[in-house]
Image: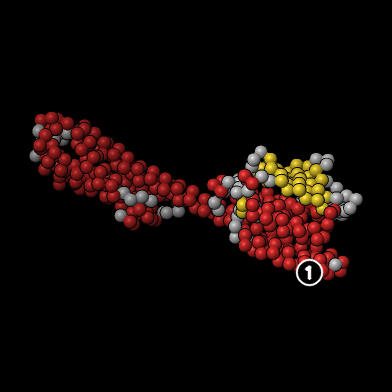
Amino acid sequence: MNKAKEIFGFDDKWLIIIGIPTITLLMNAMMFADIMLEDLLFFFTACNGIGLIYTAVLWLAFRQVVFFFAQRFSKQEDTFKRVAGQLVVVFVLFFVLKGIMDPLLHPLLDGRAKTDFSHEVAMTIGSLLVTFLVLGIYISMGFYQQLQKTMVEKERLVKENLQSQLESLKNQVNPHFLFNSLNTLSYLIPEDPAKAENFVQKLSKAYRYILEIRERELTTLEEELGFLDSFNCLLKERFGDNLRISIKVPETVKNLQILPLSLQMLFENAIKHNIVSKQHPLHIDVFLEKEDRLVVRNNLQLKNQEQPSTKIGLENIKSRYRLLTKKEVDIIITQQHFIVVLPLVSPDAVVTA
């Protein structure tokens, strides 16, 4: 039966055990109704006994036909060949087996069953209908199991693809952070070696956090804000009061989850594209909106850049949010501000990859 489950897609043991006696009884009740009314004992012994032999032989023979074609034409593109072959062979085999069994089993009815032509035709048609009904069950179950298998395989491939995309996106984060940090360090070394040394220590602490969360898809807002505090110290080493940061997030939402390093990437993005100077200080505000939306807003004072932005950082955040949570990141640009709205995610809302 294990082999049958592998080939048919389901274990047909109970279908056989229940199906053979049930079909036998129903067929005999229709074909030998007069005997059932006249002699119930003869009906259940002789008629039902012979009917069981007919049904069992036909069922098991046709089961082998289905088994053979399911093995021989197992691919999805061979479906038509498999079904057509089963129908033709079952139809021919039915008359072959009937021609063999009729002369052997009919005498056992002791001449009490009707043997006229019309009754014989009715029995044959009825038996054929039941045969193709059972065959239809096997074919339908096979289709259903094949569909389920295809859907499971498709889902597996989708998850693997999502995981692959996610890993690719996550791998963009660490080099991006390190590259920008080294740029900052290159500014500090000639200007103030003592600050450069302090910067390296804080960079080491920040990078330790990155290494700790690199395998995590989401982190709590509390952890992310803790890292952001260290990261902001690095930024202050370079920009001083020219960069003004305000973070106002209530404690009640700090257990919600956020994309790791997303805030850091948005801060880097704001600094990269905007002027940060004494005459034009850059303001970055982080605050809560509607209890589950974190807003990161900076004033717009764009640098004159020869090359347009690639927007890799923003696309990274948007793609990772979409893959992990099916939630969208909102980006709003006004004349005065550049605004990014990040969804805060409850743990049970994460899409398992």
Q: Residue at x 69, y 59 (%)?
A: 173
Residue 38 located left or right of residue 337: left
Q: Residue at x 83, y 69 (%)?
A: 193
Q: Give the residue drawn at x 81%, y 55%.
A: 272
Q: In the depicted view, which residue is nearer to us: 32 or 151?
A: 151
Q: Position of residue 133 (x, y in %)?
A: 32, 40
- At which x and y percent is residue 101? 19, 46
Color encoding of the figure:
secondary structure
In which quadrant will I find the N terminus?
A: bottom left
The residue labelled by disc 1 is 197
Seen in the picture, residue 310 relative to 94 is either above or below; the reply is below
Q: On the picture, is 119 further left or further right than 198?
A: left
Q: How many labels were placed on the picture?
A: 1
Q: Is residue 19 visible?
A: yes
Instruction: Choose between 303 and 202: the one closer to the eye.
Output: 202
User: For the point 85% across and 67% down, which residue is it?
Assistant: 192
Q: Position of residue 276 (x, y in %)?
A: 85, 53
Locate residue 112 relative to residue 170 in the image: left or right. Answer: left
| The furthest residue to the right | 279
Outermost residue on the front side: it is: 251
- The quadrant holding residue 52 is top left
Q: Nearer the viewer, residue 169 or 51?
A: 169
Residue 84 visible in the current orientation: no
Q: Is residue 74 left or right of residue 242?
A: left
> In x, y percent, where is residue 342?
68, 46
Q: Residues within 10 Å of mark 1 (few under 14, many from 20)?
A: some
The three-letter code of the residue at mark 1 reads Glu
Secondary element type, mark 1:
helix
The answer to which quarter of the image holds residue 161 is bottom right
